[in-house]
Image (cartoon, helix red, strand yellow):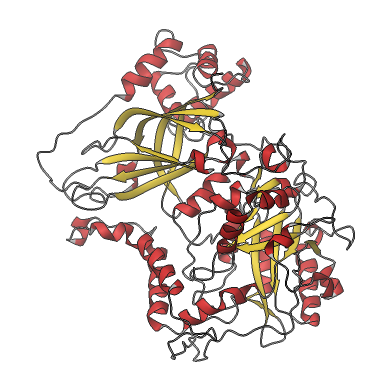
Amino acid sequence: MCSIPFGRKKSKKGDLAQDLLGDVFSTYSENGKLDAEGLLKFLQTEQGDSKSSLDDAKHLVELIRNERHKSKFPGFIVSSDLSKGDFKNYVLSPDLNGVLESTVHQDMTQPLSHYFIFTGHNSYLTGNQLSSDSSDVPIAAALQRGVRVVELDLWPDDKGGIKVTHGNTLTSPVAFEKCIKAIKANAFVSSKYPVVITLEDHLSSPLQALAAETLTNILGEDLYYPPSSDGFKELPSPESLKGKILISTKPPKEYLEAAVAQKSALKDEKILNELKKADKLQEQSTAPVKSPVEKKIAVPPSEKTKSISEEKDLSEKVGNLRVDSEGESADPAPASSPDGKKATLTADSESDDDDNKKNPEYARLITIHQSKPSKGTTVEDRLKVEGTVVRISLSETKLEKVTEEFPELVVKFTQRNILRVYPAGNRVNSSNYDPTAAWIHGAQMVAQNMQGYGKELWQAHGKFRGNGGCGYILKPKYLLEDLPNGKPFNPSAPGDTKMILKVKVMTTMGWDKAFPKYHFDLFSPPDFFTRLLVTGVPADVAKWKTSVIDDVWEPHWNEDHEFYLKCPELALLRIEVRDHDEGSQDEFEGQACLPMHEIKDGYRCVQMYDKKGSVLKGVKMLFHFQKRSFSPVQ
C-alpha cells in the first residue's frame, strides 16, 4: 500500500508480450500461427516434456482452442492452429499449464507407513477448541480438500447414545451417526485412496458395541476389516485399500495432556471472548470486501493482518496462564456454557488405552493400533519396537524434545511404524504448529487444525498438492531404509547439494478482477512484491524476495534466484505476494505452496490462494522454473 498517493514513479520491469509472446512464440510459430508440431517442440524444448507425442500436442491444441472459443462459438473451431492470443491464454492457464502433475504418479503399492498422509485434528470443530460448535460440515470440507485422516472424539450423550465433541469444554456436540454419514458421503470425492477415521473413545463397553454397529451399518462394504486381531507385520498399501475406510485409535486420555491449559482458559472470560471474536473474524475473512468509498472510510492497514497476529498472541496467553501445583488456574471464576452448566475437565474412568481390552465387536474393526505405554516407559523405549506395526502419538512439544535428543531413532521408528503428531494443548484457538520437523523425521500423520489458517497450514496444503492431490505422498528412500553407513537418516547432518532450482518470477495478474478497486489503497494501485521461502531440512531453509513495483496491477518482475537443495523431496516452496507499505508493515495478499521436487520445468502458471487456503479466483502468477542435478566438484 502506498503512503504517498501522488507523484510516485511507476517502474515496470519486462513485458509479457515481448518476453514470452515476442521471443518464445515467434521461435516455434510460423506466420503468426502455432501448429501441433510447433507446440510439441515448445513442450520438449522449453517445458522439459520429453514424454509428450505429436498426438498429445494435437489434443492439447484442441483443448486450448476449445477453451478460447467455447464462450463465443461453442462446438465450433475456425482453425486447428493457435494464434498468439491462444498461446498466451494457454501459458496463463493453471489448468492447462500447471506447475504440478494433476494425476497420481508415485508408486502406491508400498505399505501405508511409507507415505506422508494428509491428516486433520479434531476434524469436527468449526472454530476454536473450547467454545466453537461441533459439526459434520468441517469433516465433509476436509475430505473434499483431500484430507485422508479425520479425527473424532466420542463421548456418551444423555440419551444413551454417542456424541462427538471436545470433551469437558464448552464446545457443542454433534451426533456420531451424523459424522459417519458425512464421511461416507465425502470420503472419495477428491481421492479414491483410503480414509482413516481416528477415534478417541471415552465409552463404556456397551457404547463401544453401539459405535461398532453404527460404523458397520453406515459404512457397509467401504469399511475395511483387518484379517485378524494379531496385528500387521507390514501394513497394506494405499493401492490395495482403494475405496476403503479404516479405523484407528488414539489414547482416550490424550485430551488430559491439554487439560491444565484448557481448564485455565475456560476460567478466563477474557480469553473465551477473544476466541469467539477470532472465530467470527475468521468466518468473515472470505466475505466480499467493500471498498473504502462504499464505506466512506479507508480500510485500516492493520485489519487485514491483525487476525493472524492475534491467533499467535492467544496461544501464548493460554500457554502463559499461571497454574498452581495442583494444576488449577489461579483464576477462581469458572466459565459457563450457554445453557448455564459449568465446564469442567475430568478424567475418564471407563476408557482404557489398551485396544485389546475394548469391546470385541469394536476392537475387531481397528486396523491401526496405538502403542500402549507401560508404566515408567520412556518415549525412547516406545520408539524401540519390534514385531507388529504400531502407532504412537506425540504432541508437537514432545516431538521437538525427542528429535533433539535422538533424531535417528525417530526416523528408524517411522520406517515401518506410524508416528502421529498433534497440536499442543495451549492452541485453544485452533492455530497450528510448523509441520516441517515432523515430516523431515518421517512422521506420517502430522495432524493439523483444518479450520485454521496461516503459513503452517499453507505448508500442509502445499505438500499434499503433490502426487495428484490424492492425500498420500511417498516418502523418499532415505526415510524408508538405513543409509549406506548403516545408520538412519539424520535431517540435521551435513550433506551435499543434490539439486538446484532456478526460479524466475515473471508476473502476476487478476488482482483487479478479484478485489474491489480500493481494496489495496484508497488512491492508487498496489505496490506488489513477491517473497519466496523454502522450508525443509535445516540446510535447505532459505528466503528471497523481488523488488517492489509501484502502482501496477500486473507487475512484471522478470527477476530470478537459485535455491540449492540437499533434500529436495522434503522441501516446500512457499510463494507470497505482498503489498508494500512504507509507513507500516507490508500486507499479505495471496499465497501458494508447492512441493519443490514435483515442480515442472519451463514457463508455468501458478494458482494463488488466500490466507485460509481458498482459491483466489482468477489470481495467478507466471514463473519460469529450471531444475538441475548438482554434483560437487571433485
Q: Say which of 102 and 218 sits in front.
A: 102
Q: Please state which of residues 161 and 311 is positioned toward the viewer in this rendering.
A: 311
Q: Is residue 375 visible?
A: yes
Judging depth in this view, the residue of 434 and 526 nearest the camera is: 434
Q: Nearer the viewer, residue 518 or 468?
A: 468
Image position of 132 (left or right of 377): left
Tally of marks: 0
Left or right, 4 with reference to 146: left
**Residue 349 image offset from top left, x and y in percent:** 72, 85
383 vs 70: above or below: below
Rendered residue at 46%/14% (across/down): 34
Q: Is residue 69 visible?
A: no
Extreme residue toward the left, this view: 7
Question: Residue 306: where, in percent of width, then height?
Answer: 32, 61
The answer to whether 293 is drawn above or below residue 16 in the figure is: below
- Residue at point 74%, 39% (across, down): 486
Compared to residue 279, the image places residue 515 above or below, namely above
Quadrant in the rendering for residue 390: bottom right
Q: Position of residue 587 (x, y in %)?
A: 30, 50
